[in-house]
Image: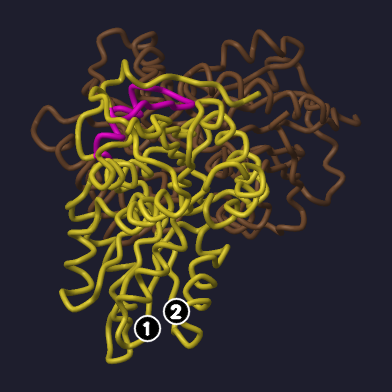
Chain colours: A yellow, B brown
Amino acid sequence: MPGDPRPIGVFDSGMGGLTVLRALVVRLPRERFVYLGDTARLPYGTKSAETVQAYALQATGLLLDQGVKMLVIACNTASSVALYLLQEAWQNIPVIGVIEPGARAGVAATRNRRIAVIATEGTVRGGAYARAIRKLMADAEIVQQACQVFVALAEEGWTDSPATQAAAEHYLGPLFRGASAPDTLVLGCTHFPVLADVIRKTIGEAVALVDSAETTAQAVAEALTRAGIESGADAGGDKARFFATDSPQRFARVGAIFFGRPIDASAVELVDLRG
Amino acid sequence: MPGDPRPIGVFDSGMGGLTVLRALVVRLPRERFVYLGDTARLPYGTKSAETVQAYALQATGLLLDQGVKMLVIACNTASSVALYLLQEAWQNIPVIGVIEPGARAGVAATRNRRIAVIATEGTVRGGAYARAIRKLMADAEIVQQACQVFVALAEEGWTDSPATQAAAEHYLGPLFRGASAPDTLVLGCTHFPVLADVIRKTIGEAVALVDSAETTAQAVAEALTRAGIESGADAGGDKARFFATDSPQRFARVGAIFFGRPIDASAVELVDLRG
């Protein structure tokens, strides 16, 4: 059986979505991927819903032009404010976001029905995680915390520096003290998995840590099966191609932090979405 | 004498340039200002020169449409990679950047001819401060350090938090130890003046701290005189009008950190530069 050789498209505002691509490559070894990071216009997390919607529509159009068989919105902000619009726009293929899988995993993990979500300002303001969690667990107590500085710390590769520890204590210390503290923390930004060790030190071993990269990869595998889309042919060679809207050098250097392996800058194609 | 009532245009990628506007308002009390923050596309500091040039040209066009008599590029990245191009494009009015005034003040302050410059990745990579300093002091020893996390810390308003102290120690501690340490530090990003207290603690009292907001305001005053442009009529009322390319609410909230006084969100006009 030849399988469906079309690639899966993965879209993010920048390099953070590479934590999702990394999980996808592990879980779906026969698939090929095309990743687009809209690095010229990142971060989306501090931008208005209208701006993010316009950017996401334009960027995913480029992936559609690459003939993808499925689209993964590996960006919490775009998933939170633009998923529905993208599903409307690209009705021929499944469009999967990161919010619903993360919410589902959070609900599955909690015992005391108290769930904390950390994300960018835009994701928190949009409230998509809280809505997705409440849909699954109506009486859940949800605490949301914007952790904007985490994004810069992750991009700097300060995965275990004193500054990151101090920021984690500032953001998370107060949330996880006391008997009524949440027992589950959803990492609602694709940048945050690389800070998981520091976050774990701050919140303690008893709290369940939900990495939405892992849970999204699982959701993509399920959606492929559900849509009856066959796995790729796996002809060997490179699993992923990369597009960026700004400096391929920076994409390769910073991206390696999130992808967990080196990225060759000469394999990153610069594209212009400014229109 | 009626004076020249036209406003002075101030352009930045976001809110950091408000430290420059703040210094301008103090130094030139008779002038009016129009400030544009290209918040939908910030940060410029991690973007390529070509992208920043295109954005800066487009954004300053909007200020020209407001009938400004002078243009201040209150953004180190844009000054570093786009000033010459903007001076070419807008030949009818003086166009002042922040790099040359900062370099001049650094050269005036140093005694041991060792000058450190901290800035965004883009400014450091462009090397404009080093070139501007060498033009004035050919044998200066220049150390440049990109401090990308400082931008996020400043925008979060963490002007004196443990995370900011740890980041300052990480970036600046090694630079300022030993007998051959620089005696002058140029704050080569408009975000950094709000972190001056923490930076001062890290580098010690003996090092001269050059705030390019102050030095740029002085350069603007001199340029007005040089060009024979009269001061504004000072009819009272609001000294500054604000334009932003994204969320006026966030502009007002975060901008107040840099402007040093409250900004009314309803007075911030949203403009679309996406074209």
Residue B1: x and y in percent read 90, 29
Based on the displayed image, in which of its 4 quarters is residue B225 positioned?
top right
Q: In the image, is A240 to the left or to the right of B73?
A: left
Image coords of residue B262 (percent x, y): 64, 60
- What segment carries the magenta color? A239-259
Circle number at residue A142: 2
Among all residues in the image, which is located at the extreme bottom? A179
Q: Position of residue A175 (x, y in %)?
A: 34, 78
- Residue B196 drawn above or below residue B102: below
- CB atoms of marks 1 and 2 within 8 Å: yes
Q: Nearer the viewer, residue A66 or B70?
A: A66
Residue B263 against residue B85 in the figure, above or below: below
Q: Amino acid at mark 2?
A: Ile
Q: At x 31% / y 32%, what residue is drawn?
A: B146
**CA–CA distance in space, label 1 to label 2:** 6 Å
- Label 1, on which residue? A114
Q: Nearer the viewer, residue B70 or A231?
A: A231
Q: Is residue B269 left or right of residue A184?
A: right
In depth, the one of A14 and B93 nearer the eye is A14
